Every structure is written in structure tokens, then in C-alpha cells.
Image: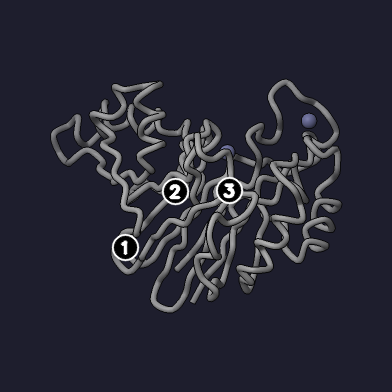
């Protein structure tokens, strides 16, 4: 499977709005966290933040089988508006009567669906979110959620393991630790919360370090990074990531897992 980091930034994103600091000026852009996973004809996207349209266009992704949401914080969920409007207006071919409008599945916890209902209930009719706590199979991919500590219980935050045969990646952009045991011990690539090391601190560094060590992935790549928030340049963030036994993520970096 091919994994592309669609975004490696924090809620602010980089450059930050209205900011001309040297860190925003000299660093590569960081969009809000999301990951694209492709396997054969199957495409899934993990997280649906406000940069979604840009992220899909930059990677020339025009067909997605399913979107998965980690939690209903706006920096992970605000791309839902773009998806909804696309469904509402139909595609160009649909307008011409020459093809079908896009369709995709949307997987989010019932708690996240409740948050969506509270803020924009009209989204639910078209987006029709569903949730399976044990995961789903799409093509060759198996996608299963695992519970993480991050603003629980109000936000029932999860990460996802995506498996193709005996290969697996894990994605948990906002987490302090696992709620239970680590979801697997054979993870090839862990796209992981990195804010205690490379961004604005979400939680204690020692707890997160312990969780990363427990999962023991072959490679751990940190997201939720921000040169702007830390007032540190990219090479300093890279050093911080290395000290944490990990690597610093960059937008649109690709990993082939086979
Ligand atoms: Zn800045
Ligand atoms: Zn969050």
C-alpha cells in the first residue's frame, strides 16, 4: 500500500493566519493532519480537516472510497463542508447527465455524529455517517479504530490501523496515550501525534514517549508539528523528533509499505 501524509501541521497550520514570522516564512507549509492510503483501486482518507480540498487536489485524488474521522475537533473535521457541498451540487458529469455524482462512505464515532448533529444537522442527510467499532474491509484494506486519550469523554477520539495482508500502518494525530493496550505490535509505519516534541504541547511528553515505545513501530513519523508555534526552524524540529526516537513528517511525503 502507498501512504501519503496529506498534512503534518497543528490546528493553526503553517503559515499561520496573519503571521509573517521568520518561521512561517522559512518553513514549508504544514496543512492540518490527514493521511491518504491507496491499495490497488482502493483509496481511503483518514481525517477531514479544513485543508481537505487542497490536499486532495495536490495529490490528484478524485475518487475516495471512504473517509475516516479520528474525532470531531474542527482541525480534523471541517473538510466535511467541502464534501457535503460536492455531494449537493453533483459533479460536472452528473450535471451533464453523463455520469454519477461522487459517492463515498464516511466513518465516524456516534459521539462525532452527535457533535455534527448539534452543529450542522443538515449535513447528516447527505453524508450519512456510519460507525463500526470493530472496523471495516474495503478492497484489500482492513481499517480498524483504536481508542486514544485525547479530550475524552467529550470527544471519543480514536486512531486507526490500516492493514493490507501482513503489512500495517497506524495513524493517531491527536493522542496522549492509548486507552487500552497498543492496537498491534506489527506496525510498519506509525503516523503519530508529535506535539510534545515538535509542536504545541497536547499532553505530557513522557506518556506519549511510553506509548510510542509500546507500539514499537518500525518507523514513527511525527505530525501535529509547527515551527511557528515552537519558534524553532525545521532542522531543530528534526532534531527534537530524532531525540524522541522518531522522524519529523512533511506534507506529501510518500511511503510504500510492502
Ligand atoms: Zn508565524
Ligand atoms: Zn483534537
In the image, 225 versus 109, the foreground residue is 109
Q: Is residue 111 left or right of residue 206?
A: left
* Secondary structure of residue under mark 1: loop
Give the mark nearer the N terminus: 2 vs 1: 1
Disc 3: which residue = 149
Give the CA separation, mark 1 to mark 3: 33 Å
Instruction: Locate the N terminus and report the quarter of the image it occupies.
Output: bottom left
* Circle count: 3
The foreground one among 29 and 201 is: 201
Whole-percent x, y for residue 43 in the image: 37, 56
Please tell me whether mark 3 or mark 2 is closer to you in this view. Answer: 3
For this view, does 130 lie left or right of residue 207?
left
Q: Which residue is mark 1?
A: 41
Residue 236 x, y percent position in the rendering = 86, 51
**Image side of residue 156 versus residue 92, left or right:** right
Q: Earlier in the sequence, mark 1 or mark 3?
A: 1
Foreground tag (2 vs 1): 1
Q: Nearer the viewer, mark 1 or mark 3?
A: 3
User: Is 166 rendered above or below residue 23?
Assistant: below
Please say if the residues under marks 1 and 3 sit with CB atoms less than 8 Å apart.
no
Q: Quickly name the residue at label 2.
A: 60
Whole-Å distance between the Cαs marked 2 and 1?
Answer: 14 Å
Q: Residues within 10 Å of mark 2 (few under 14, many from 20)?
A: few
109 vs 64, nearest the viewer: 109
Question: In the rendered structure, are the residues bearing label 3 and label 2 in contact, judged by CB atoms less than 8 Å apart?
Answer: no
User: Which element carries disc 3, helix, strand or loop?
Assistant: loop
Residue drawn at x 68%, y 40% as measured from the top left: 29
Amino acid at each position: 500500500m502507498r501512504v501519503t501524509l496529506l498534512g503534518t501541521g497543528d490546528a493553526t497550520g503553517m503559515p499561520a493566519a496573519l503571521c509573517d514570522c521568520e518561521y512561517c516564512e522559512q518553513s514549508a507549509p504544514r496543512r492540518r493532519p490527514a493521511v491518504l492510503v491507496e491499495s490497488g483501486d482502493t483509496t481511503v482518507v483518514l481525517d477531514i480537516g479544513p485543508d481537505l480540498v487542497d490536499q486532495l487536489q495536490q495529490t490528484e485524488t478524485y475518487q475516495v472510497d471512504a473517509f475516516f474521522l479520528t474525532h470531531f475537533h474542527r482541525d480534523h473535521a471541517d473538510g466535511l463542508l467541502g464534501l457535503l457541498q460536492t455531494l449537493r451540487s453533483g459533479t460536472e458529469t452528473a450535471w451533464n447527465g453523463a455520469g454519477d455524482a461522487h459517492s463515498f462512505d464516511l466513518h465516524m464515532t456516534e459521539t462525532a455524529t452527535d457533535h455534527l448533529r448539534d452543529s450542522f444537522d443538515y449535513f447528516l442527510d447527505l453524508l450519512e455517517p456510519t460507525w463500526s467499532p470493530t472496523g471495516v474491509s474495503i478492497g484489500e484494506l482492513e481499517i480498524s479504530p483504536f481508542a486514544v486519550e485525547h479530550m475524552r469523554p467529550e470527544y471519543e477520539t480514536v486512531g486507526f490501523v490500516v492493514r493490507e495482508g501482513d503489512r500495517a500502518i497506524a495513524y493517531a494525530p491527536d493522542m496522549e496515550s492509548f486507552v487500552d493496550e497498543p492496537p498491534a505490535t506489527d506496525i510498519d509505519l506509525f503516523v503519530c501525534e508529535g506535539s510534545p516534541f515538535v509542536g504545541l504541547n497536547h499532553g505530557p511528553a513522557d506518556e506519549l514517549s511510553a506509548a510510542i515505545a509500546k507500539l514499537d513501530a518500525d518507523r514513527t513519523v511525527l505530525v501535529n508539528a509547527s515551527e511557528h508555534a515552537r519558534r524553532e526552524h525545521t532542522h531543530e524540529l528534526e532534531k527534537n523528533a530524532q531525540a524522541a526516537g522518531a522522524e519529523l513528517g512533511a506534507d506529501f511525503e510518500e511511503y510504500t509499505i510492502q
